[in-house]
Image: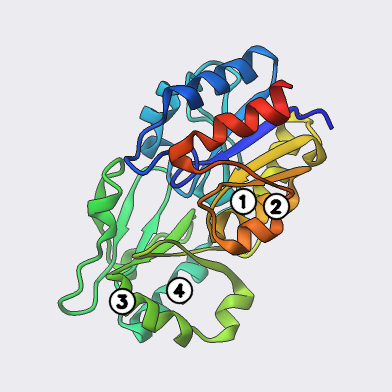
């Protein structure tokens, strides 16, 4: 198999337990680029939330691409220009907000530039604006929403103990309508049903003309599962969940042992 694109998750994968990119990982990414292999960082974050990582990895050059919002948005990293986007329309935004009210969980709407703050349950200010500092937070009145209000993702960010108790209470109809998963201990994400990192690989394929069968995907958590399953070569980190390991063809080293570099050296550079 000739790998032409490497898709890499961030937290728990490219980033070590100190949230840093090791020199070994940076060097392996550069070697892959030098051989003409596309390297794409795949994340639930907005592009602005990973610019420092892209800069460290020399992935802000013309022709470099990022796959953000868990596969719902493909952008040129150097300009931020949108190439492909799947967003939630206004009616879905209101539908998910109604669910958050029933669950008594704080909810935020996120687009390319802003974290919107609708009214929160009493005494429950969302944790998300303090986590996602790359985008400004802006209060919003649901009665004043414009008809055209495309949102890239909706999050419910609250303390993990209570969040975990509320997730099983989500009616099945919502799982049928949307892609719903936890991406961090205290973060539940709601995306369009047609969005996950696996489907994001197909958006990349449309833009770049690279078959998904010629892609390697490296990840560690539930939100990486779809791309690990979909790619021609799915790679699980040594610290990945058992679910991801079971789905992968290959298990590399952990994120503190430069597992991304090891996978690239073994299966791309060789």
- Where is residue 215, by image quadrant? top right
Residue 37 location (% of width, % of height): 69, 22
Q: Closer to the camera: disc 1 or disc 2?
A: 2
Residue count near mark 2 (Cα–Cα under 10 Å), binned few <14, some 14–19, many ≥20: many
Which residue is under mark 3?
A: 161
Q: Closer to the camera: disc 3 or disc 4?
A: 3
Q: Closer to the camera: disc 1 or disc 3?
A: 3
Q: Earlier in the sequence, mark 1 or mark 4?
A: 4
Q: CA distance from mark 3 to mark 4?
A: 21 Å
Q: CA distance from mark 1 to mark 3?
A: 26 Å
189 with respect to 123 (left or right): right
Residue count near mark 4 (Cα–Cα under 10 Å), binned few <14, some 14–19, many ≥20: some
Q: CA distance from mark 3 to mark 2?
A: 30 Å
Look at the image and tell me whether residue 78 can be seen: no
Q: Earlier in the sequence, mark 3 or mark 2?
A: 3
* CB within 8 Å, label 4 to label 2: no
Q: CA distance from mark 1 to mark 2?
A: 15 Å
Q: Looking at the image, is 134 positioned above or below residue 171? A: above
Residue 248, disc: 2
Q: Looking at the image, is 155 positioned above or below residue 163? A: above
Q: CA distance from mark 4 to mark 2?
A: 32 Å
Query: As rendered, which of 248 and 196 lies closer to the eye?
Result: 248
Query: As rendered, which of 125 and 183 lies closer to the eye?
Result: 183
141 with respect to 30 (left or right): left
Q: Residue furthest top?
A: 34
Which residue is under mark 4?
A: 96
Residue drawn 37% across and 39% down? 49
């Amino acid at each position: 198999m000739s790998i032409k694109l490497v898709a890499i998750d961030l937290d728990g994968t490219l980033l070590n337990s100190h949230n840093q990119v090791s020199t070994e990982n940076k060097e392996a990414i550069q070697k892959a680029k030098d051989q003409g292999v596309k390297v794409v960082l795949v994340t639930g974050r907005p592009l602005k939330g990973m610019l420092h990582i892209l800069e460290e990895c020399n992935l802000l050059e013309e022709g470099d691409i990022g796959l953000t919002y868990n596969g719902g948005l493909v952008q040129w990293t150097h300009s931020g220009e949108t190439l492909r986007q799947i967003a939630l329309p206004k009616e879905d935004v209101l539908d998910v907000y109604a669910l958050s009210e029933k669950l008594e969980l704080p909810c935020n709407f996120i687009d390319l530039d802003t974290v919107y703050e609708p009214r929160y349950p009493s005494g429950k200010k969302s944790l998300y604006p303090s986590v996602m500092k790359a985008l400004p937070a802006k209060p919003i009145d649901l009665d004043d929403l414009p008809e055209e209000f495309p949102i890239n993702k909706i999050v419910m960010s609250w303390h993990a103990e209570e969040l975990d108790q509320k997730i099983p209470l989500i009616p099945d109809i919502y799982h049928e309508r949307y892609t719903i998963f936890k991406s961090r201990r205290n973060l539940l994400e709601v995306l369009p049903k047609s969005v996950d990192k696996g489907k994001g690989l197909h958006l990349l394929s449309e833009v770049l003309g690279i078959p998904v069968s010629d892609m390697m995907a490296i990840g560690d958590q539930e939100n990486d599962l779809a791309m690990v399953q979909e790619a021609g070569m799915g790679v699980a980190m040594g610290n990945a969940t058992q679910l991801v390991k079971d789905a992968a063809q290959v298990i590399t080293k952990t994120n503190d042992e430069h597992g991304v570099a090891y996978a690239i050296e073994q299966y791309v550079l060789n």
